[in-house]
Image: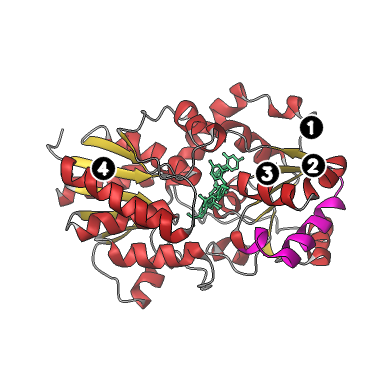
Amino acid sequence: MINMKIASVVGARPNFIKLSPLFKELNKEFEQLIIHTGQHYDYEMDKIFFDELKIPAPDYHLGVGSGTHGYQIGEIVKKTEEVLIKEKPELVIVYGDTNSTLGGALASCKLGIRTAHVEAGLRCFDRRMPEEINRILTDHSSDILFCPTSLAVRNLKKEGITQNVFKVGDVMVDGIKENLKIAEKKSDILSRLRLKPKSYILATLHRAENTDTLNRLTGILQAFENIPNLVFVCHPRTKKILEKNEFLAKLSEKIIVTPPVGYFDMLILERNAEKILTDSGGVQKEAYLLSVPCITLRERTEWVETVKAGWNILVGADKSLILDGVKNFQPPSKRINIFQGGASKKILRILKTIY
Ligand code: UD1
Ligand code: UDP
């Protein structure tokens, strides 16, 4: 064991999924602490991942909850700072591109604590996306940058970040490898929803630019209504907006709409889908890793390699482009290896060298 403390700051669903494999690996050598900001709080957006992935209960829960970006990030910085002053970790790790990621990084770097960013260097070059701002600011506040791909390393170089940048592969590859076999045994989602493998299209939708812009939302929903055998796993943000506009009841008559599912159920739904429709970052990547064609409901993506490889197309919120993609999109038979595994082990090795 190395005598030093590492604190991970997490708060949203994708943060928990990225934390899981790395936490287990780092536990072999370091004392660790989990700080949960409370950004996500419904059972199926939060605790289900700690239960399924056997992540220990957070040492601190900041209870920040929902709100505007300024409120959320401000509260996260303030409350994380209090914990960091008390606990004095030598290193803070943040994951991905959520408000919890940025809030954690700001609190840490302002106290002069070394900060590491897992999934550094991703860019979609659309600054209207809150996640793009979070990525840029987190990368520029961090001291150690763990990049999933060579492109991410190049993106950082273009912004002048070259020190302590490491291409380690993608932590989610380890997560999928470890959990797919367990998911196959444990998940009964296909029978619960009466689905046959490769006979349905899976959809997720939650990006602010899609849910909060009425004409985009309408374009996407009109497409959804016209897709036979669509399974829509609905994020609470989207559910609230659909309920407000009375879209949800109409939609539920035509397609299967389910609340968010746990990671095991999600992996099984993804793997057995004929195609995936999504605006999620993580789901685009998982579609590629699970060899499922992906139709992305955005104009730009940070996972451009999946598009270049021919397994992901960007259709935005245009009804006819979405329907055309569902009907006609066929990726090439060859699939190159974009996302390398073993990231958690590499990160452990690098941290052992640094410390
Ligand atoms: C956040 C991330 C996004 C990520 C997504 C993963 C930011 C800026 N965005 O978006 O990058 O892809 O998480 O899922 O950090 N809500 C609930 N229950 C919950 C959580 C949220 O009902 O447990 C509802 C609330 O109405 C809330 C809304 O969802 O206002 C949005 O939640 P928020 O955490 O602000 O952002 P997400 O859209 O979840
Ligand atoms: N996910 C899940 N249940 C769901 C929807 C998504 O377990 O109902 C998982 C998904 O498999 C992926 C991650 O959540 O690992 C992606 O998170 P999300 O789409 O919320 O955020 P993003 O990746 O866009 O930031």
Is the magenta region chiefly helix, strand or loop? helix
Is label 3 or label 1 in front? 3
Crowding near pointer 3: few (<14 within 10 Å), some, many (20+)? some
Q: CA distance from mark 4 to mark 2?
A: 41 Å
Which region of the structure is painted magenta? 209-229
Is disc 2 placed on a helix, strand or loop?
Answer: loop
Is disc 4 placed on a helix, strand or loop?
Answer: strand
Residue tagged by mark 2?
200
- Mark 1 and mark 2 residues within 8 Å of each other at the beta carbon: yes
**305 lies left or right of 11:** right
The image shows residue 275 at horizontal and vertical percentages of 73, 49
The image shows residue 329 at horizontal and vertical percentages of 77, 60
Residue at 16% of width from left, 52% of height from top? Answer: 354
Crowding near pointer 2: few (<14 within 10 Å), some, many (20+)? some
Q: CA distance from mark 3 to mark 2?
A: 16 Å
Q: Amino acid at mark 3?
A: Cys
